[in-house]
Image (tube, rainbow, N blue to C red):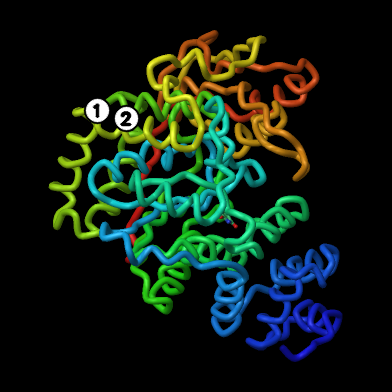
Amino acid sequence: MKHHSIIELIERKRDGGVLLSDELQWIIAEYTADRLPDYQMSSLLMAIFINGFTGEELGPWTEAMLRSGDVLDLAHIAAPKIDKHSTGGVGDKISVPLAPMVAACGISVPMMSGRGLGHTGGTLDKLESIPGFRTRLDGDEFVAIVEKHGLVLGGQSETMAPADRRIYALRDSTGTVPSLPLIASSIMSKKLAEGINGLVLDVKTGSGAFMKDEPSARLLAETMVGIGASHGTKVVATLTGMDQPLGVAVGNANEIDESLDVLAGGGPADVVELTYSLGADMLTLGGIEDTREAALARLRKAVESGAAMERFQEVIAAQDGNPDVAGNRSLLPTAPLRYELTAPDTGFVTKCDARDIGVAGVRLGAGRERKEDDVDHGVSISVLAKVGAAVDKGDVLAVVDYRDQDRMDAARPLLERAWEVGGAADEPELIIGHIA
Ligand code: URA
């Protein structure tokens, strides 16, 4: 590959210029091979963050990230291979109940998830709160588990989309996460490396999303659907609201607890609605059912018969976790101290801010402030009153289980300002639109 001057490329991007396909490929190859230091990559990422990418830049950048490692070949698996990915939210545990539900309906799900990013949670961190559960799987093991169980829930192995894994961690600590081209290329490179036939995307908009306003979230969704099309992979996206957290549980172990509720036929209404809606997309995309109605009925049956829960337990065991967690939730870690946030007035909840609650979760230890930080799986926030709820002065709005008083002191002001109580407010829309 022809050599380039990285300083010249950074300067050109900084000044609003365009990088060429072979230059973009060279940058990704050099960074993956450890020949480009983090500080130069960070500087370039900030220039991309500020100036964006043209369509001519985004394609080769994403393709280079996808080709930075192994691309799985799952052609020998007869079942339709469909995955789901969310652009990231607060309390967004949907992948956890969704993947076993659709696997129990005949979809093969080679799910490669991420860790918490900024104020948002990550599926891998949540899954690791199940005692023993191992998300670090090498390529062969990842394939063997999905072959046998129709489902695998792993992290990015060293060899799959390594450029994304490293760039993702770097963005998290350099203020370069909420960028349309960087999010689109990150998600699509790792998902297309899974060797899937189709992908269902949940694109968030609102205070707790990276794309706060609806037009940018829609553009992100359209961009990712377009990347899929030019790669020959069917991609559909749902635009969903993230002004307030999803469900009750925000944290890690408590989100697994809530996911198990959904698999057992319960769970908060919003989590259930979105899980089934995305599940119907996966089943129709995979050709298991022709209509959403039939897909929804099949998903309900998988839950009611216990097949979805059994599939989750099977995969937990295959990944060295303790499957008894399904029936014995006390196996999940908890935190010993409790704080209750109460309503300052009587009225209706008019704000329950996803971002503030997400940042409060990070301060409690549920997420990372630095990329080397460990996550505390036991700390939890239970969001008891959402927008539109009627509350009396003194009612509990949120319950926080924490471990460290200093961390609680740092989180409290954010929780206090996250809620507002006033005149009547409508429940916000959860599912805003579909893009295909
Ligand atoms: N999820 C990802 O996988 N990557 C991003 O950049 C943002 C959300």
From the viewer's side, name the closer residue of 410 and 250. Answer: 250
* Tag 2 near tag 1, CB within 8 Å: yes
**Quarter of the rendering occupied by the C terminus:** bottom left
- Examine the rendered structure and indicate whether residue 48 appears above or below residue 82: below
Q: Position of residue 167 (x, y in %)?
A: 69, 61
Q: Is residue 129 rendered to the left or right of residue 312?
A: right
Secondary element at image label 1: loop
- Examine the rendered structure and indicate whether residue 215 appears above or below residue 417: below
Residue placed at 32% from the left, 35% from the top?
311
Amino acid type, residue under disc 2 in the picture: Met
Q: Position of residue 223 (x, y in %)?
A: 47, 70
Residue placed at 46% from the left, 19% from the top?
347
Q: Which residue is mark 2?
A: 309
Q: Position of residue 315 (x, y in %)?
A: 41, 37
Give the crowd class for mark 1: few <14, some 14-19, many >=20 residues within 10 Å.
some
Q: Position of residue 377 (x, y in %)?
A: 62, 26
Residue placed at 30% from the left, 39% from the top?
101
Residue placed at 48% from the left, 24% from the top?
322
- Examine the rendered structure and indicate whether residue 235 appears above or below residue 352: below
Amino acid type, residue under disc 1 in the picture: Gly
Q: Residue furthest bottom?
A: 2
From the viewer's side, name the closer residue of 12 and 111. Answer: 111
Q: Which residue is mark 1?
A: 306
